[in-house]
Image: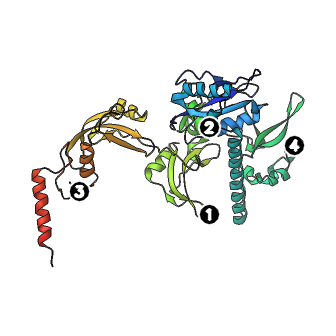
Amino acid sequence: MDKDLTSETLLVAEEKEQGKPVVKAATGKFNKDGTPQTVSAREKSNPDFLRIDRHGNALENFFSNFMRQCKNPTQFSFFKVPINSVSEMSIVIGDILKNGYESGKELLDEYRVKPEDYSKRQNKEQQTEEQTRENKTSQTNRDKKPTAISENEVDWDSLQKLGVSKEMLQKRKCLDTMLNYGKSPLLPVKMDLDGISVDTQARLAFRKGEDDKLTVAVHGVRQQPELDKPFYSHQFTDEEKKALLETGNLGKVLDLKKSDGSILPVYVSIDKLTNEIVALRADKINIPDEIKGVRLNERQKQELQEGKAVLVENMTARSGKEFSAYLQVNAEKRGLEFIFNNQVQNQQINLRIPKKLGGVSLTEKQQADLKAERTIYVQGLTDKKGEKYNAYIKVNPEKGKLDFFKWNPDKAQEKTPDNAHKTQEAVNSQGKTNEATKNVQEPLKPGQTRPNEKQQGEEAKQQKSKAKGLKV
C-alpha cells in the first residue's frame, strides 16, 4: 500500500478491557484525563482529523502533551497513515490487532509510531535550545555586554516563594536569558491556589509594568492551545487554527486591532512547552541577508518577513557539515527557527503558483487547482522561441516544480503519451537537443519531434561547411 506523503493523519488503537482494541482517528486534542480525543476513521476527509504537515511539528507537539498528561500511555498504539486511505487502513489495522495475524506484524511496524521517539526529540530540541542559550551566554560574557535587567532589580524572595532560587536558574543556564526578557525552560514551581500548595511545571519570565516595577510572569502548562477563545480581540479562523496546530506558527503576519483602534502587525506562535499562544511585534524582527553561509535572495527574505516557512539549502553548521532546513519566524523564540523534518528527508518544497504561464494569464480557479495539486489544461502557451503549444499542467511536490503533459496525467494511464510538446519545449525553451535535433537552428513547431525538410537542408549545409573546414 503506497503512502501519500503529502497528507497524513494518526490512527489510535486503544486496548479495551475485553482485549479487543478499537481503532479511531486522532483529532490532536485531549480529554480531561489526558487521553487522546478521537473520531471515527470511517469518514474520509473529516476536518477533525489531525493533519500531519511534512515540515511542521504536529506529532512532536501531540506526543509531548500525550506523554505529559496521560496516566496510562501504554494502553494506546499509534499509526501514521495516508489521509486518503484512512478508512481502509483503520479496518486493516483493526483486523490485524484483533486477530493477532503474524503476517500483519510487518505492515503494523511500517505504519507504527512510538510516542517516546517524539518525546525524546522534543527533549533534544529543548536541550539544543538550552545549549543555544548557553552559547549566547558565553558570548555575552566574553563581550562583557550588560543584560537588559540588572540582578539587583530582581525580587529573589518572590522567586523563592515559587520554589525557584538564583542558583537554580544559574545551574539551568537560563538566568541571563531571563535577564534579557527571555523565558526559562520548564521549571518545577510551587503555586498557591486558594490556600492550597500545588506542585507543577511552568516557564518563568521577568516583565516590567507601567510603573517600571519588575515582576515574575508565570507561564503554566495548558492542556491544549486555547484557539477557540478570542486572542486580543481576534477570533482565529479554522484555517489559522489548522496552521497553528500543525506547524506551531501562524505562517503569516496578523493585524491585531488595539483598544485605541490602531493596528499592530504581529507574528503568532504556540509555545511548544506550555501550549500558550504567543505574539511578537513584527517590527521586532529583522531578516538577515545571510544565514549559515547562504545568502538569501529577495524572494526568500520577503516570504520570511511575511511569516512563511522557507526552505534554505546547503547551509553550513559549526562542524563544517552542510545541512538544509526550513526557516520561519517563531514568536515564542523571538526570531527565526530551524525546522527539521527527519534531517530534511522527503522534503516538500514551497512552490509559488504563478499568475501567468507562457504568456497566458491563469484564472483564479486554475491557480487554486494548482495549489490543491489538481491538473489544469492551458491553451496558447508560448515557449521561449515564440512557438505556441497546449499542455496539461500539474504540481510536482517532490521536485518543487510544475510538470507539463500532452495528455491528462490523471486519465491517461493506459495511453502512450505524445511527447511532441515536450520535445518542442525542451528544444525551444531549454536549449536541449537529441540526435535528430542537435543541428536545428529554427524553433520547432507544435507537435514536432524531428526537423522538417527545410530544417534538414539547413542541417546538411552546416555539416558540409564543417567538413570543408577540416584539415588533413
Q: Which residue is mark 1?
A: 319
Disc 3, SS: loop
On screen, residue 420 versus residue 400, left or right, reads: left
Q: Amino acid at mark 4?
A: Gly
List the residue tagged with mark 3: 435
Few, some or many residues within 10 Å of mark 4 (<14, 14–19, 20+): some
Residue 67, x across and y down, in percent: 74, 36
Q: Does dot 1 land on a helix, a strand or a loop?
A: loop
According to the picture, the residue beneath numbered tag 2 turns out to be 106
Task: Give the CA separation, mark 2 to mark 4.
Answer: 49 Å
Q: To which quarter of the image does residue 262 belong?
A: top right
- What distance separates the C-alpha of mark 2 from that of mark 1? 38 Å
For the residue labelled by badge 4, is the local secondary structure a helix, a strand or a loop?
Answer: loop
Camera-near label (3 vs 2) is 2
**In this rendering, would 423 be left or right of 146?**
left
Among numbered discs 3 and 4, the one appearing first in the sequence: 4
Q: Is residue 226 visible?
A: no
Could you tell me how far apart the alpha carbons at marks 4 and 1 are, in whole angstroms?
A: 39 Å
Q: Residue furthest bottom?
A: 472
Q: Is residue 312 left or right of residue 73?
A: left
| Three-letter residue code for mark 1 | Ser
The image shows residue 445, relative to residue 86, as above or below, that is: below
Between 297 and 75, the one lying in front of the other is 75
Please tell me which residue lies in front, 241 or 419: 419
